[in-house]
Image (cartoon, rainbow, N blue to C red):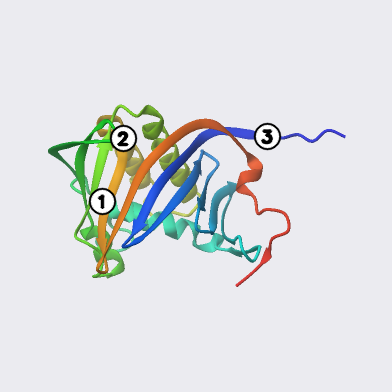
Amino acid sequence: MFVLLTAVIGYRMVEVVKDGERTDTQITYISRKGVRMYFKSGGEAIMTIQGDKMKAYILDTRRKTYMDMSSMASGFVGIYLSLFMRCRGAENCSLDRNVIKPTNEYRIIDGRRARKVIYYTKNLKSLIGFTNLPDSIESWFVKDWKDLVTAEKTRLEFFYRLVKLNDNPQPELLDELYEYLKSVFDRYGAPISTISPFMGRILYSRRITVKRLEIPDSLYQIPKGYKPGR
């Protein structure tokens, strides 16, 4: 008996993440089909599209259990996308092109020339009413790391496809936002490092490696032997 194994071209990204004094390693697989994240300290997450349905799971690798978060998947992505939308009511939003502000400050990070880019968070703070969010997030963009830039554009494409599964009151705005963010990656590159204050702590991430490879469909599925958990 033959088993048909299918795969999609994607990227494996390794990054160091710090939350205050705690340091971890995050491995993320990115493709048009989905995103899967592993943390060295334990814990995994899957977000994918199956047919015309969005699926999201949190895996507990120690207990071999999973939580189905599918009903919230588009909400997670929507929170990120709302960073770039100026809204007066749920159906009266417009694209805010002033959220991303490149500066003239440069530094060398891991041998690459990186440009400081600021993300302003006022739209997101206004939407969710979370005053503990910082006013801005500091990122350092590189243009010459082609696999990193393409990986981030691939992640954006997946998020776009995911949110498009919903009934959107302004679908043309989502299209405009997608094209705008693609143009940001084309013009400035993608973040090699991000620094953000949050509730008295400093959140930091730095991309270490990015590799183009084939990602099997099985990577976006719940592993065998896992049971529903709480």
Q: Earlier in the sequence, mark 2 or mark 3?
A: 3
The location of residue 134, given as percent across then percent down, is: 22, 62
Query: Which amino acid type is marked by label 3?
Result: Thr
**Residue linked to disc 2:** 185
Q: Earlier in the sequence, mark 3 or mark 1?
A: 3
Quarter of the figure with residue 79: bottom left
Query: Which amino acid type is marked by label 2?
Result: Phe
Quarter of the figure with residue 176: top left
Q: Considering the numbered disc 2 on the image, is that residue within a helix, a strand or a loop? A: helix
Nearer to us of marks 2 and 1 is 2
Query: Which amino acid type is marked by label 1?
Result: Ser
The location of residue 101, given as percent across then percent down, is: 17, 44
Residue 6 is labelled as: 3
Is residue 85 in view?
no
User: Which residue sits at x=18%, y=47%?
Assistant: 98
> Which quarter of the rendered picture does the N terminus lie within?
top right
Quarter of the figure with residue 190: top left
Is residue 45 shown above or below 67? above
The location of residue 4, given as percent across then percent down, is: 76, 34
**Residue linked to disc 1:** 94
- Compared across the picture, whether 147 is left or right of 223 comes to left
- Compared across the picture, whether 45 is left or right of 114 comes to right
